[in-house]
Image: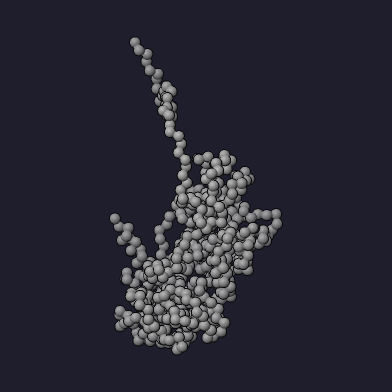
């Protein structure tokens, strides 16, 4: 009788029956590792590429299954939010073709640590790992980093047991308070030094601005919505008086204070964007007007080596409103008059300070929740030495450019009035002037439905296109009859609600199977 097989062990779930040893066939030799070009540093990187000739050392390369100490931060996937725009250079459905728009560039943050620094951090760090931007490989789910730290689900850097605040852990020193030199060491100190007079160095912005959500990406960086922390330390923030009053009003209504944070990377090699930012901050220093979107504060984020610029959170751009006209939105004569009046209030204020914006268009006009239209993006703005001064550089987008800007020296204060007229024409026609046939002229193209608008509207539009020598200024235009019949703010707020409803209906149609 043949022997019985051994009994099976049903309680050992992971046990396998023993087998005799197998003789494996000869395997082919391992193939060399080919590094994808996508993981190589960009040509503009200030650091040399890693050498493929050097073998990895055990101390500098963790095992395959070990989690990196500094994971690349990722931006969670999100649905587009066309009703939240706060920054310059944002495209919209009503924008001109890409050839006429400023490019949108994704940029990296910070710098990479060398292997000795990483090894030292592993030995000495006992806090929650701090994500650094621009590690050796980019995040596979995002083309650029985000100022939102990447942490495990359900955890918070500020609420983790044993941690009393991310910035406090990063910047604690035996000397308090920290001086600018102590806070920004090495290349950071040299890069931010030109902006020192504008930076609020007493605070870490991550202690005060929470729940960052990316809402837009523009020419110079990304924009995030953020909630102002409910803290007794709010008084430490250096903010303009009008901004403090607005924050206090929102806190008094028991509503969360929401703001916009524009994020600009700081690179060791410096950036022309920081030069432009300093010029813009210097130009707008001391300017406060209810129809101008200013920069309320500037901070340095040491976690990801970037600047945080606080601004008012806006609902949408005027270009977004105009883009919904073909979808059923109606812009009445009185609504256009209200928007034109808000633009003129901003231009008249700038003229009194001898500042020309030179890029007035619907993309740079933003609406807040109260229905107030504000002029934004002072990238091309200049200080005019005196009345009648001329300049010759061509800036802005061609559909809104005054004709004299393309033909020789021009009065920069007068070109803003032409651009205002082009924006009014755009609101009436639901597209920028000259965009249909790309044939530029010194007078507006005829409107498709001129009878939909009042005689005072047509007279106002004609005055904006007068030759520069006879073109009225903002103060003269505000006296015209067209602006004596503006609608109230509640009407504009209802218009914004209608925009949201149209977008919701459009999204529902797209989501249908």
Which residue appears at 46% of the width and 50% of the height? 37
Q: Is residue 417 above or below residue 218?
A: below
Identity of the residue furthest to the bottom in this view: 470
Residue 235 seen in render: no
Identity of the residue furthest to the right in this view: 175
Tell me the quarter of the picture where residue 405 sits: bottom left
Q: Is residue 421 above or below residue 497?
A: below
Which residue appears at 50% of the width and 65% of the height? 220
Image quarter of the C terminus: bottom left
Q: Position of residue 464 (x, y in %)?
A: 42, 84
Q: Position of residue 418 (x, y in %)?
A: 43, 81
Identity of the residue furthest to the left in this view: 513
Q: Position of residue 492 (x, y in %)?
A: 41, 74
Q: How many marks?
A: 0
- Foreground pick, 270 / 225: 270
Q: Is residue 229 above or below residue 17?
A: below
Colouring mode (rainbow / by chain / secondary structure / one colour): one colour
- Report the side of 24 relative to 354 (left or right): left
Which residue appears at 41% of the width and 86% of the height? 466
Identity of the residue furthest to the front in this view: 53
- Foreground pick, 326 / 31: 31
Which residue appears at 67% of the width and 60% of the height? 181
- Foreground pick, 342 / 35: 35
Q: Is residue 387 above or below residue 158?
A: below
Q: Position of residue 294 (x, y in %)?
A: 53, 71
Residue 464 seen in render: yes
Tell me the quarter of the picture where residue 338 sits: bottom left
- Report the side of 456 relative to 206 (left or right): left
Image quarter of the N terminus: top left
């Amino acid at each position: 009788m043949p022997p019985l097989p051994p009994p099976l062990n049903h309680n050992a779930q992971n046990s396998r029956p023993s087998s005799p040893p197998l003789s494996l066939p000869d395997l082919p030799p391992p193939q060399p590792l080919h590094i994808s070009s996508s993981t190589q540093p960009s040509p503009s990187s200030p650091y040399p590429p890693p050498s493929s000739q050097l073998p990895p050392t055990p101390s500098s390369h963790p095992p395959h299954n070990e989690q990196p100490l500094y994971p690349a931060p990722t931006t969670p996937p999100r649905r587009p939010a066309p009703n939240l725009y706060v920054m310059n250079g944002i495209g919209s459905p009503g924008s001109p073709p890409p050839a006429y728009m400023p490019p949108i560039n994704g940029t990296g943050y910070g710098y990479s640590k060398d292997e000795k620094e990483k090894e030292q951090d592993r030995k000495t760090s006992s806090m929650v790992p701090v994500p650094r931007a621009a590690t050796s490989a980019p995040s596979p789910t995002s083309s650029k980093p985000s100022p939102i730290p990447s942490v495990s689900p359900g955890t918070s850097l500020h609420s983790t047991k044993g941690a009393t605040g991310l910035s406090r852990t990063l910047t604690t020193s035996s000397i308090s308070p920290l001086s600018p030199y102590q806070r920004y060491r090495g290349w950071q100190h040299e890069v931010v030094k030109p902006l020192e007079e504008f930076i609020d160095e007493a605070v870490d912005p991550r202690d005060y601005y929470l729940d960052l959500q990316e809402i837009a990406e523009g020419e110079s960086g990304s924009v995030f919505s953020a909630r102002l922390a409910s803290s007794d330390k709010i008084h430490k923030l250096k903010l303009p008086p009008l901004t403090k009053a607005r924050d206090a009003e929102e806190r008094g209504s028991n509503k969360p204070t929401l703001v916009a944070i524009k994020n600009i990377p700081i690179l060791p090699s410096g950036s022309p964007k920081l030069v432009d930012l300093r010029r813009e901050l210097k130009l707008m220093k001391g300017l406060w007007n209810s129809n101008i979107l200013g920069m309320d504060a500037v901070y340095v984020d040491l976690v990801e080596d970037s600047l945080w610029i606080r601004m008012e959170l806006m609902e949408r751009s005027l270009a977004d409103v105009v883009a919904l006209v073909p979808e059923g939105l109606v812009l009445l004569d009185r609504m256009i008059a209200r928007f034109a009046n808000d633009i003129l209030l901003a231009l008249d204020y700038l003229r009194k300070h001898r500042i020309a914006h030179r890029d007035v268009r619907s993309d740079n006009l933003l609406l807040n929740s109260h229905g107030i239209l504000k002029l934004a993006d002072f990238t091309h703005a200049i200080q005019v030495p005196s009345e009648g001064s001329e300049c010759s550089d061509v800036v802005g987008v061609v559909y809104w450019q005054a004709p004299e800007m393309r033909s020789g020296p021009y009065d920069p204060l007068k070109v803003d009035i032409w651009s205002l007229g082009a924006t009014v024409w755009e609101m009436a026609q639901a597209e920028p002037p000259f965009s249909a046939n790309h044939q530029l002229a010194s007078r507006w193209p005829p409107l498709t439905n001129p009878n939909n608008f009042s005689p005072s509207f047509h007279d106002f539009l004609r005055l904006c296109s007068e030759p520069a020598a006879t073109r009225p200024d903002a103060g003269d235009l505000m006296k015209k009859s067209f602006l004596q019949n503006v609608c109230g703010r509640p009407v504009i707020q209802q218009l914004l609600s209608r925009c949201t409803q149209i977008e919701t209906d459009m999204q529902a149609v797209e989501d249908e199977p």
